[in-house]
Amino acid sequence: MGTIMFNGNRNREERTAPGTAQTNARRGQFSVLGADIVVTGDITATADLHIDGRVEGDVRCGSLVQGAESQIFGRVEAEDARLAGLVEGAVHVRRLIIERTARITGDVEYETLTVEQGGHIDGRLKHREDTIAAAAAAAPPPLLQAVGGETA
């Protein structure tokens, strides 16, 4: 499978500090796959992505909007997603909105979830903790030190 990159400003991103590339990419950049487009292969986009066509592969992006007639056959990973079409594959999203026309077959992992009346999910729903809170909870407890040479 091939990978399609949807961002023509790679040089600008390489000059930015680590962790800021996605923030800069989200300002004003938006890629659209029209209804007449069929992509066979994985898609990775640092910009926001709107899919109205068909994707036979995994989709990884910052923010995803899926049209009602769109079809995705593969894994979806995004910070935010608004799904309105068909998805056959796992969905891993921080903030997820499932519209009334959406049909999802696969496990869904999310932090926040909104499902409009009529939206359909055939799979397991798994709430995940905020990654920062989860990392803090997984950190070892701080060491206690006695003051004045005495132990508790």
Image: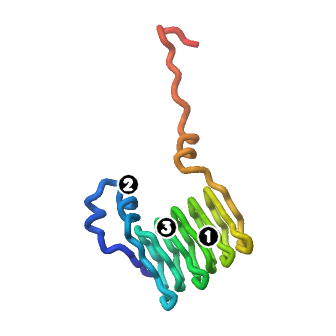
Q: Is residue 151 above or below residue 40?
A: above
Q: Judge depth for marks 3 and 2 and give the one in front.
A: 3
Residue position for label 3: 63
Q: Amino acid at mark 1?
A: Ala
Disc 2 is placed on an element classified as loop
Q: Residues within 10 Å of mark 3 (few under 14, many from 20)?
A: many
Circle 3/circle 2 CB separation < 8 Å: no
Q: Is residue 135 above or below residue 11?
A: above
Q: Judge depth for marks 3 and 1 and give the one in front.
A: 3
| Sequence-earlier tag: 3 or 2 | 2
Q: Camera-side residue: 121 or 57?
A: 121
Q: Amino acid at mark 3?
A: Ser
Q: Quadrant of residue 4?
A: bottom left
Q: Camera-side residue: 96 or 151?
A: 96
Report the residue at 38% width, 75% height from top: 5
Q: Residues within 10 Å of mark 1 (few under 14, many from 20)?
A: many
Would residue 105 be seen by someone viewing this image from the given angle? no
Label 2, label 1: how far apart the Cα atoms are: 26 Å
User: Which label belongs to residue 19?
Assistant: 2
Disc 1 is placed on an element classified as loop
Report the residue at 63% width, 62% height from top: 109
User: Which label belongs to residue 90?
Assistant: 1
